[in-house]
Image (tube, rainbow, N blue to C red):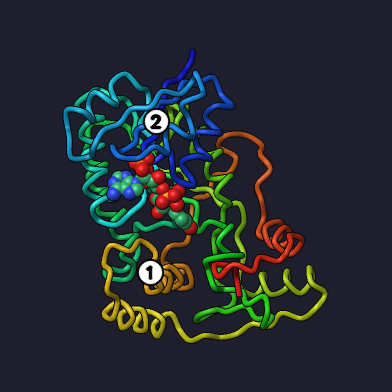
C-alpha cells in the first residue's frame, strides 16, 4: 500500500535528501513549508507524487489541515528554541489533533539524553522537546546518528588539512560516531515507512577515534598527520561559555561556541551512541569516515572561505 508521508523542512539540506529517499519507495510525499518562500515550489512542484502545503507554525488550524491524512509526520526543521521547541510543539499538537499515527522529531544528532545540564544548548532543546513527544499520544521515533560525517571536511574543525593535524580534547581514543547525511536520509525514509519503528533508532556509518582519523589521513595522503591535544573537554566547555557570553546573536543555530559544545559532548563520551542498530533495515553500504576523507582529497581544491583549513 502506498504510504503518505509529510516532511516539514523539506526545503533544507537534509530534508531534500529525505524526500529523495522517500520517493525511491512506494510513497506519496506532502511537503510542509512556511508562507513567503518559493523554494518548495521550485524544488517540488513538477513532481506529481509530491504536493506542497503552506502553513505557519503559529496557525494551529492550518497546521492540522496540512498534516491530516498522512501516515507519518517527519520533521526536519532546523533552528533554536523558536523552531526545535516552539514550532515542533505546534507540529506535534497538529499531528495529534489530526490523528496522525506517527511522528519523527528533528533530532538527527548524537545521543542527547544523558548529557550534563548546561553542556550543549542544541542537544538540550531536543531533550526538552523529546519530553513533549514522550507525553503525546502518538508513536514517535528519534533518529540518533552522531555527527554528520560530511562535516569532517567542512564545518567541524577537527582536521587541519594544511597543518596535517587532527585535534582532540581529553582523549585521542574516545570513540566518535559519524554518519553521512545521505545515510541518515535513507534511514529516516525507512523509519517513516516502518509502522513498528521503536522510540529511538541509533545508527552510525562509522565509529572512529581522533587517533583513527590521524592514521587514516596519513594513509590516504602518504604524509604524517599528527594528533594535537587541544585541552580537556572541561577547558573547552569553559571556553565555549566565554565565547557564548560575547556572542551577539542568540538565534544563530551553529555559532562557534555551539561547535565547541558539540565537541565537548562527543569527546566527553556523554553523547556517544550505545545501541547502534545499522542492520534494522537490512544490508546497506554505509559510508565510512575514510570514504568521506578520500572523496574530499580526490575532489578539486575548494578555495571558498567555508572550506576546511
Ligand atoms: N548531526 C549533525 O551533525 C547535524 C548537522 C547539521 C544539521 N543537523 C540537524 O539536521 C536537521 C536538518 O538540518 P538542515 O541542515 O537540513 O537544515 P536547513 O538546511 O537549515 O533546513 C531546515 C528547514 O527548516 C525550515 N525552517 C527554517 N527556519 C524555520 C523556522 N523558523 N520555523 C520553522 N521551520 C523553519 C525550513 O523549511 P521551510 O522554509 O520550507 O519552512 C528549512 O528549509 C536539524 O535537526 C539539524 O539540527 C544535524
Q: Residue at x 28, y 69 (%)?
A: 249
Q: Cβ(mark 2) to ligand 1 < 8 Å?
A: yes
Instruction: Farthest residue to the top: give it.
Output: 1
Give the residue drawn at x 49%, y 13%: 1
Residue 239 relative to residue 21: left or right: left
The image shows a total of numbered marks equal to 2
Q: CA distance from mark 1 to mark 2?
A: 28 Å
CA neighbours of label 1 inside 10 A, class few (<14), some (14 to 19), many (20+): some
Is 175 displayed left or right of 125 in the figure? Answer: right
Would you say residue 199 is visible in this rendering? no
Q: Quadrant of residue 206?
A: bottom right
Q: Please name the residue that numbered disc 1 is placed on.
A: 255
State the SS at label 2.
Answer: strand
* SS of the residue under disc 1: loop
Of callouts 1 and 2, which one flags the residue occurring earlier in the amino acid sequence? 2
Residue occupying image coordinates x 67% and y 75% = 161
Q: Where the C terminus falls, by quadrant?
A: bottom right
Task: Please give the label number shown on residue 31.
Answer: 2
What number is the disc on residue 173? none
Q: Nearer the viewer, residue 295 or 263?
A: 295
Identify the residue shown where x is 61% and y is 65%: 153
Amino acid at each position: 500500500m502506498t504510504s503518505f508521508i509529510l516532511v516539514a523542512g523539506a526545503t533544507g539540506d537534509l530534508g531534500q535528501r529525505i524526500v529523495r529517499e522517500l520517493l525511491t519507495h512506494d510513497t506519496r510525499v506532502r511537503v510542509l513549508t512556511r508562507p513567503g518562500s518559493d523554494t518548495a515550489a521550485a524544488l517540488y512542484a513538477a513532481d506529481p507524487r509530491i504536493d506542497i502545503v503552506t502553513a505557519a507554525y503559529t496557525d494551529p488550524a492550518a497546521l492540522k489541515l496540512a498534516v491530516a491524512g498522512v501516515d507519518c509526520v517527519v520533521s526536519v526543521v532546523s533552528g533554536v528554541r523558536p523552531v526545535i521547541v516552539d514550532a515542533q510543539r505546534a507540529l506535534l499538537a497538529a499531528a495529534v489533533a489530526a490523528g496522525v499515527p506517527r511522528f519523527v522529531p528533528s533530532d538527527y544528532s548524537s545521543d542527547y539524553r544523558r548529557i550534563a545540564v548546561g553542556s550543549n544548548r542544541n542537544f538540550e532543546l531536543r531533550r526538552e522537546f523529546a519530553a513533549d513527544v514522550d507525553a503525546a499520544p502518538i508513536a514517535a521515533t528519534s533518529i540518533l546518528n552522531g555527527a554528520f560525517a560530511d562535516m569532517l571536511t567542512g564545518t567541524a574543525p577537527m582536521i587541519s588539512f594544511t597543518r596535517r593535524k587532527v585535534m582532540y580534547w581529553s582523549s585521542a581514543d574516545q570513540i566518535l560516531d559519524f554518519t553521512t547525511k545521505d545515510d541518515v536520509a535513507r534511514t529516516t525514509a525507512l523509519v517513516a515507512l516502518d509502522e513498528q519503528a521503536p522510540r529511538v533508532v541509533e545508527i552510525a556509518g562509522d565509529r572512529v577515534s581522533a587517533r583513527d582519523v590521524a592514521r587514516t589521513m596519513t594513509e590516504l595522503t602518504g604524509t604524517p598527520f599528527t594528533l594535537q591535544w587541544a585541552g580537556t573537554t572541561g577547558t573547552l566547555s569553559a571556553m565555549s561559555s566565554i565565547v557564548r557570553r560575547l556572542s551577539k546573536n542568540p538565534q544563530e543555530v551553529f555559532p562557534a561556541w555551539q561547535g565547541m559544545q558539540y565537541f565537548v559532548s562527543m569527546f566527553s563520551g556523554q553523547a556517544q551512541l550505545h545501541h547502534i542498530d545499522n542492520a534494522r533495515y537490512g544490508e546497506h553500504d554505509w559510508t565510512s569516515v575514510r570514504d568521506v576523507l578520500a572523496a574530499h582529497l580526490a575532489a578539486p581544491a575548494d578555495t571558498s572561505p567555508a572550506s576546511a583549513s
